[in-house]
Image (cartoon, rainbow, N blue to C red):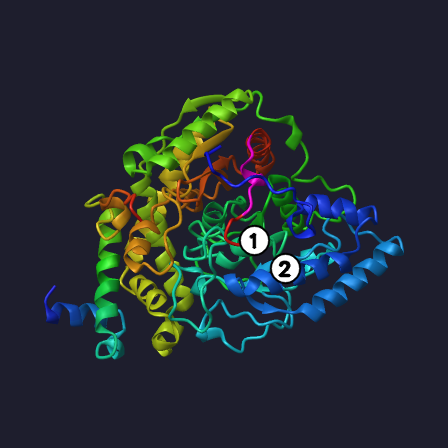
């Protein structure tokens, strides 16, 4: 997603006022929502979810 | 039992006795509610500062309620087994006259004008409500240090998290500060602290316990339920939360516990923790041992197959974040910096899900419910993993992010079936391991019966946290 696409997605969600102050949060939120949407349609297995990708770490 | 595990406590101290035992002592006037509350307040003084489980403690109010209970009981007005017992309340549920903050800056200064339905039920049954318990902010995501109050700690090891979001409820009960506490559960938030803290947590059937007076997270996923140190105690508090406690002639969720597991058909859902996701070896072994215990108790154990765990988790995530945005969106827009960063980012995700995403999730939810219902045609109870690994350190953000979502509780928020988590072992590092049992709709009695059979056949419930002796 390039900068313009990002701005449009945020604008459509009515969150443009947060663009300048919370850009990293918005990017994280969009990525998480995309991951869920992909998982819902079986396109991926909640790729944002670390539990899906990583085996347990017995050293911790 | 693991070699080197702590030995069972003699439980002679009042703060370690079960709610059922305390209730009987109060009923027979061998114990005064005042004596009990004084003992618990002393316990809170001792371990409370180490665990940060309370956000608001009304010691004087609790003592006044205890004196009133003592007067009533002495006068022959005994209201039932909850009369004179202290019950902690998660800080998203209203108690009239006390703060309800949801552990968030957003709600600082919010004083409840009226009781939630469940707190009114508990008062009517004679319970004492000493205060409000810590939680994860707004009942979503994990422990966060970016909030007006510190996060609750795990009594087994204060460097570890206690699960959540009903974190204070789990920590307070597991550490002996309270015999009973109330939590909420939209994606596992009662069962997670029960699993992490080695106690019993029950998410009842969706709709069984009224949620009026609790700040919502997700309208179609929210549940209220009990946390306790024994199965019988969880049943006792469920009586209170459903308004049965103290009702003349009412049946109890504790009825029939003694019947044991004999004859129960239990489906063991292995693929959640063996194939769909990988539980750590100790958790997987604890689940295998639990199946063996239940078989020895007379249950029939068969492998049960549900849809993949990932399908459930995608549905519960989409519905939860969509509904949470409906509830919290206006506040996030107006006061984004009054939320912790973790909560803010999670809520904002809901803004980027569409109406069609939500509808698709609800359609898929219907299919998942049908699939689970089909399995219950052949089984009375399901044995399922709860947490796929023990609680991690609370200050290790990377490990928290990796391990926190490793769970199999969300499926039963999607379907609304009653589900109970309880201790099923100790890890080599001394942290509780757990199991989850799931029942048919509105068949909490059979679910509790299976859990009681496991509890009676094992000693896990007799162990006490080593970090808060």
Mark number, residue B175? 1
Asked if labels 1 and 2 touch by Cβ distance under 8 angstroms, the answer is yes
Which residue shows up at 56% across the image and 63% down it?
B48
Q: Tell me if residue B167 comes above or below residue B23 in the rendering.
A: below
The total of numbered circles placed on residues is 2
Query: What secondary structure is marked by label 2?
Result: helix
Residue B115 in magenta stretch: no
Write the start and end of the magenta stretch as one range: B458-464
Residue B29 relative to residue B13: left or right: right
- In percent of width and height, residue B267 lies at 44, 27
- In percent of width and height, residue B46 lies at 60, 62
Residue B386 relative to residue B119: left or right: left
- In percent of width and height, residue B352 lies at 26, 63
Quick one: label 1, few (<14), some, or many (20+) residues within 10 Å? many
Q: Which residue does the numbered mark 2 point to in the structure image?
A: B43
Q: Tell me if residue B36 comes above or below residue B455 in the rendering.
A: below
First-in-chain label (2 vs 1): 2
Quadrant in the rendering for residue B106: bottom left
Residue B110 relative to residue B304: left or right: right
Quadrant in the rendering for residue B147: bottom left
């Amino acid at each position: 997603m390039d900068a313009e696409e990002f701005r449009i997605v945020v604008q459509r969600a009515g969150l443009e006022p947060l663009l300048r102050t919370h850009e990293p949060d918005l990017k994280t939120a969009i990525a998480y929502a995309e991951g869920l949407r992909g998982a819902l349609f079986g396109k991926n297995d909640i790729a944002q979810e670390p539990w899906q990708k990583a085996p347990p770490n017995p050293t911790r | 039992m693991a070699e080197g595990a702590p030995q069972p406590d003699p439980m002679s101290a009042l703060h370690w006795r079960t709610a059922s035992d305390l209730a009987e002592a109060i009923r027979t006037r061998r114990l005064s509610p005042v004596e009990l509350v004084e003992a618990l307040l002393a316990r809170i003084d001792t371990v409370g500062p180490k665990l940060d489980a309370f956000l608001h403690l009304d010691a004087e109010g609790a003592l006044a309620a205890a004196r009133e209970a003592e007067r009533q009981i002495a006068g022959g007005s005994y209201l039932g087994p909850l009369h004179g017992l202290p019950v902690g309340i998660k800080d998203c549920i209203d108690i009239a006259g006390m703060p309800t903050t949801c552990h968030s800056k957003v709600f600082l200064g919010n004083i409840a004008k009226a009781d939630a339905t469940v707190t009114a039920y508990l008062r009517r049954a004679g319970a004492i409500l000493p205060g409000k318990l810590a939680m994860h902010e707004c009942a979503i995501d994990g422990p966060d240090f970016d909030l007006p109050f510190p996060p609750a700690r795990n009594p087994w090891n204060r460097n570890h998290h206690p699960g959540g979001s009903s974190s204070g409820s789990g920590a307070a009960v597991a550490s002996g500060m309270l015999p009973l506490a109330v939590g909420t559960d939209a994606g596992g938030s009662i069962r997670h602290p029960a699993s992490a803290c080695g106690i019993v947590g029950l998410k009842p059937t969706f709709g069984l316990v009224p949620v009026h007076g609790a700040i919502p997270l997700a309208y179609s996923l929210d549940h209220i339920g009990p946390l306790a140190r024994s199965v019988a105690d969880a049943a006792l508090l469920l009586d209170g939360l459903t308004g049965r406690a103290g009702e003349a002639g009412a049946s109890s969720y504790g009825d029939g516990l003694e019947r044991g597991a004999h004859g129960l058909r239990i489906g063991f859902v292995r693929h959640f923790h063996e194939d769909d996701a990988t539980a750590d070896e100790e958790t997987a072994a604890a689940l295998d041992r639990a199946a063996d215990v239940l078989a020895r108790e007379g249950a029939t154990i068969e492998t049960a197959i549900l849809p993949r765990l990932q399908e459930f988790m995608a549905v519960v995530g989409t519905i939860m974040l969509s509904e949470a945005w409906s509830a919290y969106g206006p506040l996030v827009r107006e006061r984004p910096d009054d939320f912790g960063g973790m909560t803010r980012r999670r809520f904002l995700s809901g803004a980027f899900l569409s109406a069609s995403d939500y509808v698709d999730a609800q359609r898929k939810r219907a299919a998942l419910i049908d699939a689970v219902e089909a399995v219950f045609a052949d089984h009375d109870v399901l044995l399922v993993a709860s947490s796929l690994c023990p609680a991690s350190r609370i200050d290790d953000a990377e490990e928290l992010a990796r391990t926190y979502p490793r769970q199999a509780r969300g499926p039963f928020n999607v379907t609304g079936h009653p589900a109970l988590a309880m201790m099923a072992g100790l890890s080599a590092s001394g942290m509780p391991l757990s199991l989850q049992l799931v029942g048919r709709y509105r068949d909490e009695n059979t679910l509790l019966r299976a859990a009681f059979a496991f509890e009676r056949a094992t000693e896990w419930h007799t162990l006490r946290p080593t970090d808060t002796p």
